[in-house]
Amino acid sequence: MIGRRSYYFIVILVLFAPAIYSLKSESIRIHKGDFDFYYIRLKKQPRHERAEFHDLRTSQFTNPLFEKKLEEFSDLFLDRFKIQSEQVHLKGETNTVLVLHDSFTFSQYSGKPKFLAAFYEVDRRTFYFQNPDTLYKRNILYDTIDHEICHFLSPSQDKPESHWLEESYCESKFPTSSEPAKDKKRSRTPKFADWKAFKKSQNKNLSNGSQMSRVSAYRFAYEWGQFLRKAKGEDWFRDCLSNHRCDSEFAKLYQRFIE
């Protein structure tokens, strides 16, 4: 038999559980070119699992400031996209671009740590960006957009085993994740005996490493990518991303890299 106190507790829990556990958000949407752009902010603190954009009870809201921000970001994104797509003679399919209000919202939607600037998810064909104001203050707004577009246009985007190499390519062209990566001196060359150990470490740390491990991994990605582009050229690098025919050259190239 349920006591009076227990009964009232159950009633309160039933009444307020949806408010505690439901994940709601507000969004502004515009469509330009081949992209749907959304500015999203969360109305309530969700549970810790990743937010699913298409499953959320997302309501449209009006805010002139955020609408202007999304308009400016979408124009900037499309301008940068046009430049890169013309350079590599590629045009992507329709994709979604999410501009997230804060780092918490970014983490909930992307499933990535709050300290990352942006992320492109191939399977969902979705870009995730931190608040453009935040990226601008960190002086990485343009490089961040270019970096994610680089991933989008990469010939290896559907090959998980090439993630480390693709990251090296994009980070060397558009460094975003590590300020030391912009230094010209290579004073922190990775200490691995061979390129396979380097590859294994990079794949692990770029995807699942701690913040400190990722900073080092992105620095190495920048340096490795810079080295390959100078040693072998841009066309060779992109060809390498698409067909792996360059794997046999990595042993010699890596030895030159760490000298």
Image: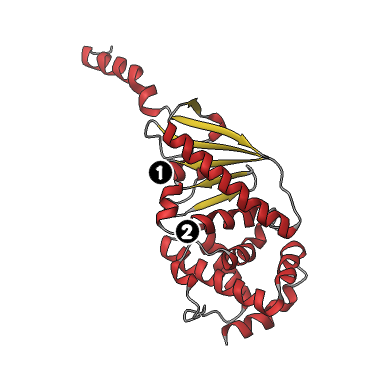
The x, y position of residue 123, in whole percent, is 65, 45
Disc 2 marks which amino acid?
A: Ile
**Foreground residue among 128 and 76:** 76
Which residue is at a point 43% across and 32% down the rendered structure image?
64
The residue tagged 2 is 140
Q: Is residue 251 above or below residue 96?
A: below
The x, y position of residue 237, in whole percent, is 71, 69
Which residue is at a point 43% across and 60% down the rendered structure image?
210
Element type at mark 1? loop
Q: Is residue 63 above or below residue 9?
A: below
Label 2 crowding class (10 Å Cα cut-off): few <14, some 14-19, many 20+?
A: some
Whole-number angstrom distance, CA of label 2 to CA of label 1: 16 Å
Q: Is residue 194 left or right of residue 156?
A: left
Element type at mark 2? loop
Tell me the number on the disc at residue 102: 1
Disc 1 marks which amino acid?
A: Asp
